[in-house]
Structures are given as C-alpha cells and as structure tokens.
Image (cartoon, helix red, strand yellow):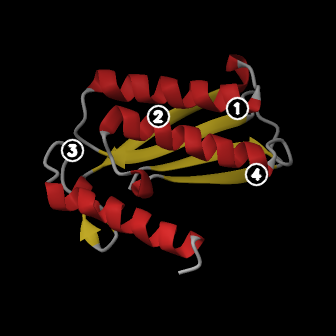
Amino acid sequence: MPFYRCVVPKDSVAYEQRAAVARAFTDVHCGSTGAPRSFVHVAFDETDSRQETPYFVDGFNRAGRPQALKDQLLADLIGAFREVTGVSAAQVSGRINEGPASWTMEGGMVLPEPGAETAEWYEHDERTEDRLGQAAAGG
C-alpha cells in the first residue's frame, strides 16, 4: 500500500536511477515498518514546471505510526533519493500523507492497521515472491 510519487523535472532522472530509487525506497520503507516488499509502489511524474524546489517526494501510507517513525521515514526517503540522483538537499522536498488502512486494498485484502498484521498477511509477500521467481525461471 505505501505509494511514493517522485515529481522530477523532465529528463532529469535516468531510468536506471529510477529503478535504484524504487529499490532504495522499498528498502527504507520495509526496514522502517516491516511491510512486505511487494506492497511498496514507486512512480515518477515528470514536469516541465520550473519550481524553486524542482524535486518532490510525495508519499501516502497507512495512518497510525508514531510521529518519530514518520519523520525518520521521510528523512531516509529523501536521503536515498539524493544519494541515487545526486541532487542537493536544497533541490528536494517531500511529505507523507496518511489515510486509514481500511481505505486501501492490496492483493485483494483490506489492509490491517499498523501493528495489527497477522502472519497470514505476510504470506502475500511470500506468494508474490514465489510467482516472480517462477516467472523469471520461465515457469
């Protein structure tokens, strides 16, 4: 369910960098929250707009986590973005919006509140990884 949208100037972030940002965001989010890796989504929107802060990380997550964790998560996401892209701190800003878990479905399941996940909830990630592995092997 976590969704991160990176607003970037047109042609400023190569596709290889986008893949690296997506992996880094997945690492940061899952390392901070314990969410399954297959639930993290990252998209890039290019803009021709000339903003004072041309890069923006816009996140949406389940509500209910401690403020300190949210603050660290945003700082780590922006840090990962900067590390991969090489942009300066003055060029990137961001935010994380939140909504109730019950407003979101992932893999056909309404998401539980943070901390209320059962073992079955994490099986989705294992099934997804199995399917991806089979597809990569040609099966």
Q: Earlier in the sequence, mark 2 or mark 3?
A: 2
Residue 126 badge: none
Mark 2 to mark 3: distance in Å? 16 Å
Of residues 69 and 52, the one nearer the viewer is 69
Return the residue at label 4: 46
* SS for callout 2: helix
Picture residue at 33% right of the left edge, 61% below the top = 126
Q: Which residue is mark 1?
A: 84
Q: Residue at x 49, y 73 (%)?
A: 134
Pointers 3 and 1 in contact (C-beta within 8 Å): no
Residue found farthest to the bottom = 139
Mark pair 3, 4: CA separation = 32 Å
**Residue 28 disc label:** 2
Q: Is residue 10 above or below residue 79?
A: below
**Does label 3 or label 4 sit earlier along the sequence?**
4
Assign the N terminus to one quadrant of the image: bottom left
Q: Is residue 35 left or right of residue 116?
A: right
Task: Look at the numbered disc 3 and give the secondary structure of its residue.
Answer: loop
